[in-house]
Each structure stands twice: as C-alpha cells, then as structure tokens.
Image (cartoon, rainbow, N blue to C red):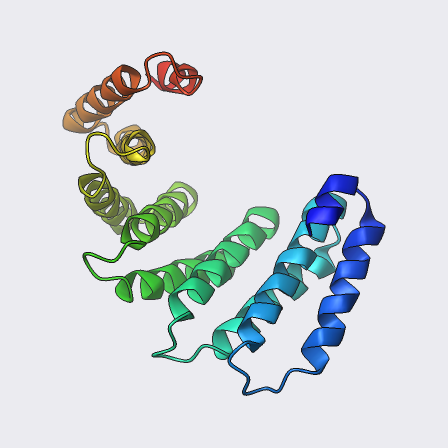
Amino acid sequence: RVKFRDSDGQRSLDDATKILRDALAHIPLNSDDRFEYLLVLSMCISDRFKRFGDPGDMDEAVDLARQALLATPPGHRERPGCLDYLAVSLFNRFQHTGNRADLDEAINSQEEALSLRPPGHHNRPNSLATCGAFLTDRFRYYGRPSDIDDAIILHREALSLRTKDHIERPMAMHNLASALLERYRQYYRQPDIEETISLYRECLAILSGSWERAGSMTNL
C-alpha cells in the first residue's frame, strides 16, 4: 500500500493485492491471524476503488471486511476494531450508492463496537464520535428525530472525555456543534444555536494561531 501511494500507479497496488490473495489462500480458516490479512486486503482494494472508481472494488472491500468480522467472533480481542472497519467501509459505500441498508448496518456495527468499549476504554471517545457522525448523517438524509438526539448525546459524552488540554478536544467540540446546528436547522430551537455559537467561539480560542482556526471561523 505504501509503494502504491508513493508511485500513484495501479500496477503496484495490483501486485500488493495479488500477494495478499496468495498469502490468504495459505492461511487456515481457523488461524488467529486470518482477520489481519483480510483487513489489509480490504484496505488495498478500497484504496484502488478510491483511486480508480471500480464499483466492484468497493463491494469486494466490504465483503472482505465482513469476512474479517466473521474471523473475530464475540469475545475476540480484535472484534471492536473489525466492527469499526466494517462500519466505515459500509458508510463509504453508502456515500457513493445512497443505499440506506449500508448506512443502517454501519450504524449497527458501530453501536456494537461502542458497546464493547465501556467507560474507561481508550477507544471509547472515537467510537462515540463515529457513531454520532453516522447518526447525524442518517438524520440529515432521512429525518428521524431520535437519530439527531442520540447523536448529540454521544457527542456530549465524547467531549466530556476530552480534557481541556487534549489535542482532540476542538474536534469533539466541532462534532457536537455540527450536530446541534443540524437539529437547529430542522427545529429552530434557540438553545441549540446558542450552544453551537458558544462551542465554536471556544474552538476559536483554543485554536488561536492554528490553520484549523479558519474552519471554525467559517462555521461561526
């Protein structure tokens, strides 16, 4: 994958994909390492889709992510990560095809990953943010009120887990502000827009002198 990205050509990625397929063919179905090869192969094929746009690659990337999840049954230490990757793969396909079933499954997968990362887990903030973002998009496209309410709850928790000096705090604030703004645009609740403005102002203060400040200024 690194060689492909450096050369920006299809041949290197095709070579990497072939090597991974050959390696996977020699790995037993019950091997503890099989899921890793499936994930890396899925990533390579996903890269190829992003570069060259073959829909078949997108579908195969999702299928391989499903296989990786099957190789990490409940209780497996890597199951949350495989759920994460499947969720993102499905969401990426939804963005290209508009198939709601993909978005729904992405949310279900991410919710399962979140359930496996209880309070105190180091990856819980990321799962909260991803799940919140997916729910916000489903609300944006399909308008189910509970989705945006749940998204805001998730983003609030994610923000509460980012201390004042945490490098990811501005992003957590932005995520919450975006969800609140989405709800305001639909229902015109004054507290939502007031909190949105307050969050973006705090972002500006934190990002003083940063290139990311421009984005917060635009949103404000």
Q: Tell me where residue 138 appears, x and y as whole percent.
A: 40, 48
Residue 44 screen position, x and y as percent? 67, 57
Residue 201 vs 83, above or below: the answer is above
Q: Quadrant of residue 106?
A: bottom left
Q: Is residue 180 left or right of residue 217?
A: left
At x 71% / y 81%, what residue is drawn? 25
Using the image as rendered, state which of residue 26 and residue 106 is in the foreground. Answer: 26
**Residue 174 position by quadrant:** top left
- In the image, 148: left or right of 40? left
* Number of numbered tags placed on the structure image: 0
Q: Which quarter of the picture shows residue 117? A: bottom left
Farthest residue toward the left? 191
Q: Residue at x 54, y 87 (%)?
A: 30
Vertical comparison of 113 with 21: above or below = above
Q: State the residue in front, 176 or 23.
A: 23
Q: Nearer the viewer, residue 55 or 3?
A: 3
| Horizontal side, residue 78 vs residue 95: left or right | left
- Give coordinates of residue 63: x percent, y percent: 61, 69
- In the picture shown, does residue 19 fall above or below 183? below
The residue depicted at 75 percent of the width and 47 percent of the height is 4
Q: Residue furthest right?
A: 11
Residue sitting at x 60%, y 51%: 97
User: Does residue 20 appear left or right of residue 66 in this picture?
Assistant: right
Name the foreground residue: 103 vs 113: 113
From the top left corner, tell me how far across and down residue 60 is, in percent. Answer: 67, 65
- Quadrant containing the C terminus in the rendered view: top left
